[in-house]
Image (cartoon, helix red, strand yellow):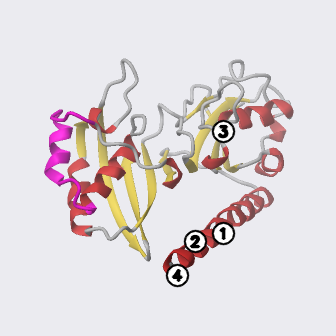
Amino acid sequence: MRFALRIAYDGTAFYGFQRQPDVRTVEGELLRVLTKLGIIDDAEGSNFKGASRTDRGVSAFFNVIAFNAQDRPDLVRTEVLNHHLRDVWVLGIAEVPEDFHPRFQVRSKTYRYYLVDEGFDREKMEECARVFIGKHDFSAFARLEPGKEPTREITGVRLTGRTGYYIIEIEGKSFLWEMARRMVNAIRFCGLGLMEPVEVERRLKGQYTEKVPPAPPDGLVLWHMRYPGLEFQADERGLKKAKRDLFDRYSRALTRAALLGDVLLKF
């Protein structure tokens, strides 16, 4: 039997998604639990695949992995998995066909970036955001891997203003390494008057001498993935634990941020 898991994780607890020797990663934590429970023997034998290899510090509310349960498929339940996992939560499970690959069969991905308001010009930010929509060469907005095709299509960039911060949502089918974070920084630079939207246009046409640097990873969340026809199910006890853990984790972060804000205002 082949399963797909919808997972969430706190990226600040890991050295990225992809497994690496001698450091803690999201993939490593998932494989640790799946092998410990006897659900799989190893990554290769179970055809273990992930949808998105997020960078160090980047979190997710909706990433997907898939694997063949070589034994004990009865233990593939949110309640069981969330009891053993640390800093990763399973939010849903689906049985999928043997040829299911979460990276190649996703229709779209949405990233969210939480950006502290530095006194931005919102109109300039929105003008800059619109420039990215469509199919472009994103070489100036990515850390390119050898042989990687730099053309990508962005289907939407949305800005939502909240008290003290902005949410920037970027949607597309696939993204290059650091692409979303570099796009965010370009929008930020436009909002601060450090860059004009026309300069973004030029970079997308290959007219540049230096790349836009990436925004810090801790503000980025892989927010949603769209798989038409695929529904993830969760048992209530396992989902309740995940919700409680996530609330505790991020409510503490919100309290620290509010405290820091008061300290800064005082001085």
Sequence-wise, which precedes: disc 4 or disc 2?
2
Q: Nearer the viewer, mark 1 or mark 4?
A: 4
State which region is magenta.
191-210
In three-dimensional space, the C-alpha distance between marks 3 and 1, rounded to whole angstroms, equals: 22 Å
Sequence-wise, which precedes: disc 1 or disc 4?
1
In three-dimensional space, the C-alpha distance between marks 1 and 4, rounded to whole angstroms, equals: 23 Å
In three-dimensional space, the C-alpha distance between marks 4 and 2, rounded to whole angstroms, equals: 10 Å
Q: Position of residue 261 (x, y in %)?
A: 53, 74
Sequence-wise, which precedes: disc 3 or disc 1?
3
User: How packed is label 3: few (under 14 Cα within 10 Å), some, or many (20 or more)?
Assistant: many
Extreme bottom residue here? 266
Q: Which mark is residue 266?
A: 4
- Amino acid marked by disc 4: Lys
The residue that label 3 is drawn on is: 26
Identity of the residue drawn at 42% across and 39% down? 178
Query: Badges 1 and 4: C-beta atoms under 8 Å apart?
Result: no
Q: Is residue 53 above or below residue 154?
A: above
Sequence-wise, which precedes: disc 2 or disc 3?
3
- Observer-nearest of 195 and 224: 195
Identity of the residue drawn at 27% across and 62% down? 192
Which secondary structure, mark 2?
A: helix
Q: Which mark is residue 260?
A: 2
Sequence-wise, which precedes: disc 4 or disc 3?
3
